[in-house]
Image (cartoon, rainbow, N blue to C red):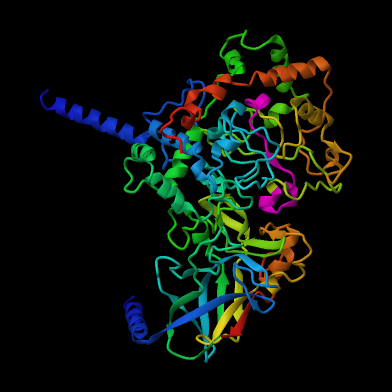
């Protein structure tokens, strides 16, 4: 008992002593290598939405160990290790959106050199299924809550090109229990993203809609969508992009939607 | 004596306080007689008349939609037992819902809400989907929570209603208050005064002889109707304050069979959409049959226009669709309920059955001013 207390104190002191430095991971959206906004430029599709939750953000130090990016609680976008990214500004093709944007997660890391980033796209189980009416930021946004599926949309994204478009709502499905009292979900659909060559301070993480739309023609005049239903054929390609196996809904494959781009 | 009296008084007062605490909806009357159980109410949202009145305003307030064109009542009209007469509901921006608006009468007794969502058992949670959902857009308030709250704050009438409905809350202007009040209002819509109910209470003349014969048919093993549409609320997904079990039923009635293997149209696969379990294909909740004569068209997608057609569907033991994208014989669906076996009815029997179903229409619930549009009565409150 005493030993463990001492160890705890030593560890605490060690962590106090450990110098931490601010670190930021910046996100951006692209399609075919071009930046996306809600306001379509010539020849580039317009974003209709792009908001998503990330948690368990870690960076890999030179010695191969992973350090958690300790998020600052800003009472708005970041709280208790969970962050909401918002790359739409509510203008033009994004009428359901908000003027406020949040393109980066910020926190602190032990001082050092890092190469490699990993995070989970989603909301941790307990918080995903807690009562949305009493949730605090960033989980207090009715646009992100998936009221009839009992959890949150981990990601809501959409693109429009002329009359054609695509949108996806990614989240847990096949949940058992009742709202506020969910026991488990058959398809958790949390995507584990790892980007081996990410350098903080130098690189941007790009949400690549080309990967999301792989195999989907954006100009065939047929709008398509995916709301994460286990049988939804239009979810097959986007799920592959997230590294989520569409039939088992586990994550055995590599993801392709997030890419590292030098700033 | 002098010492016992005060102790007795204290005990009585304590008991009263305890009872008051134990039964928070003490002042609320459901308007039902003792033969029926009261609905179950979430402990954090006890019924009060003030809350019901606030909920009624909100239910009829078009400012709760993105373009001020629709309120809850747009799809839930009192005269149609709080349905809208459409096959599929239409949202504020013109988007069609895959399914039709369900009746709200006696929804307080529903063990699960909507057509096939096993996750939804509280009206407070359900209300969030029409308000904020965006696939499809219903009232279209996704991300506009604050607009609703500001509207309440800025309206003198709501200031009074909100403070009366939520006297204990520090800041009662919230979406929580909105959905709690709306849920309380919807829960208050109770109907047990149809001619059939009169007959049950001993008034033999309340329904026609034809309806009595239809009732016998309805509750017969030959027709099997009551297996799914049984109990005091004519649905097997019924719960109440004294329920000990979670009664919930989802059934495939052989409406579709697109591929010979039981497939339903992709936008309406029923419980399967929620669970991903193939055995849940085409399973929907059996809705209450109370007021069924005024809630046409029928089925989750309004694909059956009349009661006669609905009976013909069950009589055949599943629907045959011979043309179009939904071609297939529902009778042969591998997922069809064991109770959909088919039956034959004479013309008189069919008329009797319909007479019985019509006896479930409660004129009072369709007209009672307690559940009517408050804005249509007061000039000052019109938004």
Q: Residue furthest top?
A: B205
> Residue B17 vs residue B277: left or right?
left
> Residue A160 vs residue B314: left or right?
left
**Is B132 colored magenta in this rendering?**
no
- The answer to whether residue A21 shows anywhere in this view is yes
- Quadrant in which the N terminus of chain B is drawn: top left
Q: What number of labels is visible?
A: 0
Query: Viewer-proximal residue, B302 or B374?
Result: B374
**Is B293 colored magenta in this rendering?**
yes
Q: Residue at x 69, y 51 (%)?
A: B273
Question: Which residues fall within the magenta stretch?
Answer: B272-294
Quarter occupied by residue A154: bottom right
> Residue B334 vs residue A84: left or right?
right
Q: Residue at x 64, y 72 (%)?
A: A41
Say above or below: B311 vs B215: below
Residue A34 in the image: state x and y as whole percent: 65, 78
Residue A131 in the image: state x and y as whole percent: 47, 53
């Amino acid at each position: 008992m005493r030993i463990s207390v001492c160890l705890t104190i030593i560890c605490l002191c060690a962590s106090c002593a450990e110098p931490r430095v601010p670190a930021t991971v910046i996100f951006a959206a692209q399609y075919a290598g071009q930046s996306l906004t809600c306001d379509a430029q010539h020849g580039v599709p317009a974003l209709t939405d792009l908001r998503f939750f990330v948690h368990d953000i870690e960076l890999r130090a030179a010695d191969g160990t992973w350090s958690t990016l300790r998020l600052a609680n800003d009472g708005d976008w970041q709280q208790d290790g969970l962050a909401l990214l918002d790359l739409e500004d509510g203008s033009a093709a994004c009428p359901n959106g908000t003027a406020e944007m949040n393109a980066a997660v910020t926190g602190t890391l032990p001082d050092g050199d890092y190469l490699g980033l990993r995070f989970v796209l989603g909301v941790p189980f307990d918080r995903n299924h807690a009562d949305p009416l009493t949730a605090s930021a960033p989980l207090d946004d009715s646009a992100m809550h998936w009221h009839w599926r009992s959890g949150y949309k981990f990601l809501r994204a959409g693109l429009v090109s002329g009359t054609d478009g695509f949108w996806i709502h990614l989240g847990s499905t096949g949940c058992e229990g009742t709202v506020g009292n969910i026991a488990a979900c058959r398809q958790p659909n949390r995507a584990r993203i790892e980007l081996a060559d990410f350098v903080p301070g130098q690189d941007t993480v790009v949400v690549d809609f080309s990967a999301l739309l792989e195999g989907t023609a954006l100009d065939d005049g047929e709008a398509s969508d995916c709301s994460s239903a286990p049988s939804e054929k239009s979810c097959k390609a986007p799920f592959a992009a997230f590294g989520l196996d569409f039939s088992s809904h586990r994550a055995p494959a590599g993801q392709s939607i997030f890419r590292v781009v030098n700033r | 004596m002098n010492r016992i009296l005060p102790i007795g008084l204290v005990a009585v007062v304590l008991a009263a306080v305890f009872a008051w605490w134990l039964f928070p909806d003490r002042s609320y009357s459901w308007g039902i007689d003792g033969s029926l159980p009261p609905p179950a109410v979430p402990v954090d949202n006890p019924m009060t008349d003030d809350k019901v009145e606030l909920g009624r305003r909100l239910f009829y307030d078009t400012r709760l939609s993105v373009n001020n064109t629709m309120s809850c009542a747009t799809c839930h009209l009192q005269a149609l037992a709080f349905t809208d007469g459409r096959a599929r509901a239409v949202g504020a921006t013109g988007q069609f819902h895959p399914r039709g608006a369900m009746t709200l009468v006696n929804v307080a007794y529903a063990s699960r809400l909507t057509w096939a969502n096993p996750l939804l058992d509280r009206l407070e949670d359900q209300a969030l989907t029409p308000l904020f959902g965006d696939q499809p857009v219903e009232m279209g308030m996704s991300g506009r929570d604050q607009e609703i709250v500001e509207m309440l704050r800025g309206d003198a009438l709501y200031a009074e209603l909100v403070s009366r409905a939520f006297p204990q809350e520090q800041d009662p202007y919230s979406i929580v208050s909105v959905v709690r009040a709306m849920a309380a209002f919807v829960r208050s819509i109770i109907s047990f005064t149809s001619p059939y109910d009169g007959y049950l209470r001993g008034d033999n003349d309340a329904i026609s002889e034809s309806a009595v014969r239809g009732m016998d048919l309805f509750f017969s093993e030959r027709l099997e109707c009551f297996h799914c549409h049984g109990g005091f609320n004519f649905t097997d997904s019924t719960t109440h304050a004294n329920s000990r079990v979670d009664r919930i039923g989802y059934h495939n009635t052989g409406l579709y069979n697109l591929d010979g293997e039981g497939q339903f149209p992709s936008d309406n696969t029923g419980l399967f959409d929620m669970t991903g379990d193939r055995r849940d294909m085409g399973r929907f909740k059996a809705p209450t049959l109370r007021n069924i004569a005024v809630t046409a068209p029928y089925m989750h997608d309004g694909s059956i226009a009349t009661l006669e057609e609905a009976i013909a569907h069950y009589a055949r033991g599943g629907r045959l669709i011979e043309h179009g994208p939904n071609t297939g014989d529902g009778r042969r669906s591998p997922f069809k309920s064991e109770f959909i076996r088919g039956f034959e009815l004479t013309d008189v029997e069919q008329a009797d059955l319909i007479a019985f179903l019509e006896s479930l229409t409660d004129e009072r619930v369709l007209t009672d001013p307690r559940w009517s549009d408050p804005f249509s009565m007061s000039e000052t409150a019109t938004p």
